[in-house]
Amino acid sequence: MEKVINKDLLSHLLLLESDQQDKVLDFIKELIQKQDINFNAIESEKAIESNLTKSFKDFNNDFESWKMKKI
């Protein structure tokens, strides 16, 4: 998807004072962060459903084996 800034959006942003622009920017950053969090959650759910994750017990066993090799 091509990322283009809407001309109408730009024209409205230009009308805002600096503090108002800061608020809009904060809102946009929060929106993007939520989008990223939701994407990561969906990907995690897919990994769990596909058995691409380890159980805590398996992870712990692997970690203990690794620690023993390091000693």
Image: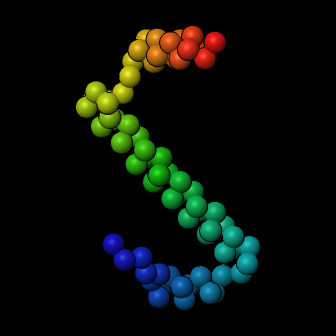
| Residue 48, horizontal then vertical, whole percent | 32, 30
55 with respect to 51 (left or right): right
67 with respect to 43 (left or right): right
x 62%, y 87%: residue: 14
x 57%, y 10%: residue: 68
Figure coloring: rainbow
Work out whether 55 lies above or below 29. above
x 61%, y 69%: residue: 24
Q: Residue furthest left?
A: 50
The foreground one among 10 and 56 is: 56
The foreground one among 6 and 15 is: 6
| Residue 59, horizontal then vertical, whole percent | 45, 18
The N terminus sits in image quarter: bottom left
Work out whether 51 lies above or below 60. below
The answer to whether residue 11 is seen in the rendering is yes
Work out whether 2 lies above or below 64. below
38 with respect to 11 (left or right): left
